[in-house]
Amino acid sequence: MNAADLKNIKITGGYWKARTDINRTVTLTTEYEQLKITGRYDTFKQIWKEGMPEKPHYFWDSDVAKWIEACAYNLIHHTDTKTEELVDLIIDDIEKAQWEDGYLNSYFTVVEKDKRWTNLLIKHELYCAGHLIEAAVAYNEAIGKKKFLQIMCGYANHIDSVFGPEKGKLHGYPGHEEIELALVKLYKATNEKRYLKLAEFFVTERGKQPSYFDWEEKQNTGLLRYNRKKGTTKPYSYVQAQAPVAEQTAIEGHSVRALYYLAGVADIAEHTGNMDLLEACERLYENMVNKRMYITGGVGSTPDIERFSFDYDLPNETAYAETCAAIASVFFCNRMLNITKDGKYADTMELALHNGVMAGISLDGTEFFYANPLATDTRAVDEETLEFKAHMGYKRRKWFGCACCPPNIARLLSSLGLYFYSYDCNGIYINLYGSSEFSHEGMLLTQITNYPWDENIKIRVGCDGGCSKKIALRIPGWCRKLSIRIISRNVSAEFKKGYAYLERIWHDGDEIDLFLKMPVEKMQAHPHVRHNTGKTALKRGPVVYCIEEEDNGKNLSSLVLRSNDEFQSIYDDNFLGGCVYLTGPAYRLSEKEFSGMLYRPYSPDYEKVEIKAIPYAMWTNRTPGDMLIWLNII
């Protein structure tokens, strides 16, 4: 399948329209203000001197680049002269900051001028280059201005002159992956095969022994390295360099790096036909979703350097589940979906979008989570220190010292339509549901729905005369009962790998009615997930629910559900921006018989109560307090 062109897609209503509108009108402005306040926006002006405040950091370029990319996507459908002028001004500064040989990095231009390409493991040079390339490609595609793209082609040419398998070049690769997928985008934008070849080199060189990072350290003694006590540098599993990817059996290390890398691996597999790489992507995906992923689609279970730990290790209160990792999962799964036409990748993409990603931003679009725990007790959180240690807490923040997540979620929301539709020579694939339009080769598909709150999706077909293209509807893996009707008549469909294929002569005005039954389900974790033994989580369709102190009082862990009790789903247009919440019976363990004792013989006493559960993505948008996803069940 081919990814659809964003110019041919519009989000027209419902949940996603509200969120993308806020992103465009509020979030981008909020982030611009933070970029200005913290010195990031002006970093390419090269005015910083030793002793001045706001010393540039080696990942700042990426923060600016992601914001530019988000702006670019929004400019496709929304003319905004002010935003375009702001972007053009910073592109002017970027051009002036570029070295004569094409090199471009604001940190190494003013802070460590003689250290470029000496510490690939730590210093994010290639990572920042990748984000700048993505921004340049997006800006060119959005409004046709080529200046930024030409600047980044110059930088890519420089990088190609430095790295590669040839004698005299560095045989290195980034400590933080990202440039791999960016170079593929640049190749597709320019048709310059050198960029694809360089991306392939970075993908396939990684993990070869002896390690490049060992060689790098020997050449440059005294470099800043990761803390060896945390096991991060040898055997380099933290940066997915413990072995070539084709030999890896489990997804390891820093979760964002791992998934950016796999997105790049998938790109190279698609463009080169390398089946070993594709099989590695499939193998590591299965390990992730079946053994290392939260029910919210979040990944990276430990705040110990933001990494995957081991199979079935999924703690709740200390879950890291970085917003960027959920976003990277969307990138990876979308690529695998288009390569394989297998709906399981869209299932994971949808789960992450509705839960692990959207928990990362407040409903008003002004505050963000870096980490996304699945349970919080406000008494256990030191708000003064935990932001510094692990970006964790029960209140979203306006910004972070390491601010990768806010502009990342902005660029994802700005480009959200890309994940809704795909196509091939035979027809159109609807991968995600939500009110939207997609035009392709004389055919217009219009989704009309309040999904994910509503079970019904109407798809209106527009075309001139008869059209014989197939329309493939994704049938989510969570759905166990469905119906498909065309012009109010039941129809049969060919079901394959999570899609229902409808083939007929389509006429203007034809309507498809898709019904996906969404009962409230009590979910159970694998028995090896020790943190959730004897517990359940509430889920309806793609949406995972949680309970908050605001609705259910303190000591949420004392609540118990019974397996046969049913929950009611209620849509309220005035609650949390419009959503379905759940109500149902629970039982609270009584404290009365303890009389000051810490322990007593087992004799539980329950008080029946009514509880209210809200979508996890919307937690702590009211009064901050305790939260819980996994509840006790008997």
Image: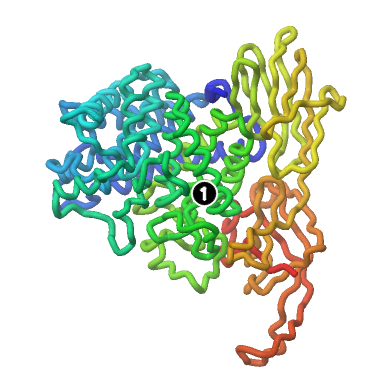
**Element marked by disc 1:** loop
* Camera sees residue 244: yes
Q: Residue furthest top?
A: 465
Residue 223 screen position, x and y as percent:
18, 52
Residue 436 screen position, x and y as percent:
64, 29
Q: Is residue 408 above or below residue 53?
A: above
Using the image as rendered, state which of residue 305 and residue 165 is in the foreground.
Answer: 165
Residue 90 screen position, x and y as percent:
30, 32
The image's colour scheme reads rainbow
* Camera sees residue 131: no
Q: Place residue 342 in its image quadrant.
A: top right
Q: Residue furthest right?
A: 489
Q: Name the quadrant of the C terminus.
A: bottom right
Using the image as rendered, state which of residue 48 and residue 496 is in the foreground.
Answer: 496
Q: Place residue 176 in its image quadrant.
A: top left
Q: Which residue is mark 1?
A: 361
| Total count of labels | 1
Residue 291 screen position, x and y as percent:
55, 53
Image point (21%, 54%), residue name: 224
Image point (12%, 41%), residue name: 114
Amino acid under disc 1: Ile
